[in-house]
Image (cartoon, helix red, strand yellow):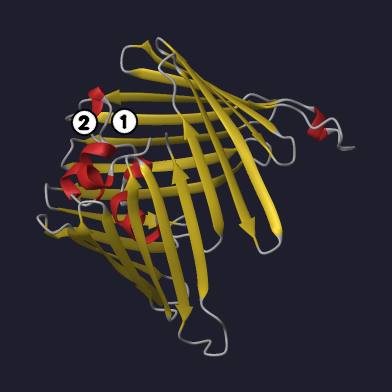
Amino acid sequence: MMYELHRDVFDLHSILEIVSASPNMANGPAPFSDIGKQAKDLLTKDYNFDHKFTFLVPSPTGLGLTATGVKKDQIFIGDICTQYKNGNTTVDVKVDTYSKVSTKVTVNEIFSSTKAALSFDVPDHKSGKVSSLLLKYVLDVQYLHNHAAINSSIGLNPAPLLEVAATLGDKNLVLGGEIGFDTASASFTRYNAGIGFNKADFSAALILMDKGKALKASYIHSVNPLNGIVVAAEMTHRFSSYENSFTIGSSHAIDPYTRVKTRFSDNGKVAMLCQREWRPKSLITVSAEYDTKAINASPKLGLALALKP
């Protein structure tokens, strides 16, 4: 969903409300994947160093269309997505440049506070691999409660990959974890834990990730809501190598329709973007990144255009 710049992207309180957009999450904890997401979005979202074009066509009948194209060097890739909504059911179908068809059927309120989604890819009959000729089904189930949020995913095949994430708390304090288990190899693919603390003007998170091998801390703060000034930082410590890495960034509203973001990382890379809402819900974004440790390398430049009639 695309939000209007002058109303949503600059106010941290609005960002927190967007994350908790579901009615069942108004006072409940966010899913585990949303712990630290506000800071990560400020530091990474909308940065693009290729040429990207997005065209969105909404429809009052419930059928929407989105076409996306990206040019990387001399290669052009793209996809076309359609979405159909009818009552509590949403069907998403995506076809990419390589003729891969992905389908997702989502049913909201299948039970009280429960959402289920079935995803599958149409087989690539041009491939000679037997595994490519088999349908790959994945079932996702989400349960939201005033004091808990549970997300689960399982592959519907003889040796599925099972993933479960859960959080406890409320909209201000969240504590949770996630695990992934591969039944084929009888091994854990992931196990992480995290805690998040949210207030109207700031959000902080601490995540033990990479199977306990690293600790990441993130923080985002609305410095001046009137001018849309928001700052964020992420720091990661790896226990095995004792290495520390960090990224800091900011977002500033130049006017109700224009924002500028900056980012600096410990690896010497400096990035900046300028985004303009030149017509309602249509955005143009210019991004640039320079590696201060590679003085002979040219800066990376990117242009993204999103149109919504």
Q: Quadrant of residue 287?
A: bottom left
Q: Is residue 159 visible?
A: yes
Q: Position of residue 174 (x, y in %)?
A: 23, 42
Viewer-proximal residue, 83 or 244? Answer: 83
Residue under pointer 1? 149
Is 130 rendered above or below residue 291? above
Viewer-proximal residue, 29 or 8? Answer: 8
Left or right of 225 in this view: 293: right
| Residue located 80% across and 34% down the image | 131
| Residue located 24% across and 35% down the image | 29
Q: Is mark 2 on a helix, strand or loop?
A: loop
What's the amino acid at mark 2? Gly
Left or right of 305 in this view: 19: left
What's the amino acid at mark 1? Ala
Q: Position of residue 245 (x, y in %)?
A: 39, 74
Is 68 rendered above or below residue 294? above
Q: What element carries label 1?
A: strand
Determine contact: label 2, label 1, CB under 8 Å.
yes
Q: Residues within 10 Å of mark 2 (few under 14, many from 20)?
A: many
Q: In which quarter of the image is residue 255?
A: bottom left
Is 24 rendered above or below residue 217? above
Q: Is residue 234 visible?
A: no
| Residue located 52% across and 64% down the image | 49
Question: CA gap, disc 2 to disc 1?
Answer: 8 Å
Residue under pointer 2? 28
Q: In which quarter of the image is residue 161?
A: top right
Q: Position of residue 289 (x, y in %)?
A: 46, 73
